Image (tube, rainbow, N blue to C red):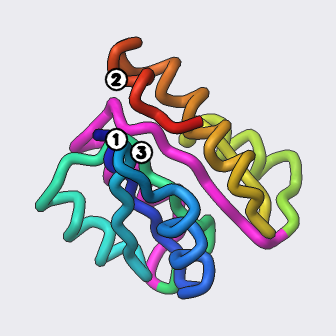
Amino acid sequence: MIRVLTVDDDPSILKALKLGLGSKDMEVDVAENGAGAITLGALKQYDVLIADLCLPDMNGLVLIEQVKRRSPEVVSIVITGNPVDEGLRKAIGHQADGYLEKPLDMKQVKGAIGRGLRDGLETAEVAHCPI
């Protein structure tokens, strides 16, 4: 089972990710802010973190940094609806394993998860990813 934590302050994005990714092989939890994500991360180990760059209580890159301190193997994907300049794109690439712009395309999200899992997890675990 692949465990995914999605973090965004837009309930429609959270709902789309939960419905679009959830399956018998992928469990998806949601949080509306960084503090909620940190709380969930303390209760459960996640394989993938999908975080909005602009959260109401912290920057998504700060959240990724905090999560990776506790779970360095987590695959992290940043999502954003704001235009990103080259400097920020490099910062995202340094901290995160993937980057996607909104509006999200579920095929691209699954592809980013699959690439991250293939790079970071054992082949046997990747076989369970419905991509």
> Mark 3 highlights which residue?
48
Disc 1 secondary structure class: strand
Q: Which mark is residue 125?
A: 2
Residue range of the region highlighted in magenta in the rendering: 57-82
Q: Which quarter of the rendering shows the N terminus?
A: top left
- Comparing labels 2 and 3, the label whose residue is closer to the camera: 2
The residue shown at (60%, 73%) is 16
Q: Please, is residue 57 above or below residue 78 in the view?
A: below
Compare marks 2 and 3 and give the one earlier in the sequence.
3
Q: Quadrant of residue 127?
A: top left
Compare marks 1 and 3 and give the one earlier in the sequence.
1
Q: Which mark is residue 123?
A: none
Q: Which mark is residue 2?
A: 1
Callout 2, which amino acid? Glu
**Is residue 34 on the magenta stretch?**
no
Residue 34: image location, x then y, percent: 39, 73
Residue 35: image location, x then y, percent: 31, 76
Task: Give the side of residue 13 with respect to residue 118, left or right.
Answer: right
CA separation, marks 2 and 3?
13 Å
Task: Give the side of residue 51 with respect to residue 111, left or right.
Answer: left
Callout 1, which amino acid? Ile
The residue shown at (43%, 23%) is 126
CA separation, marks 2 and 1?
8 Å
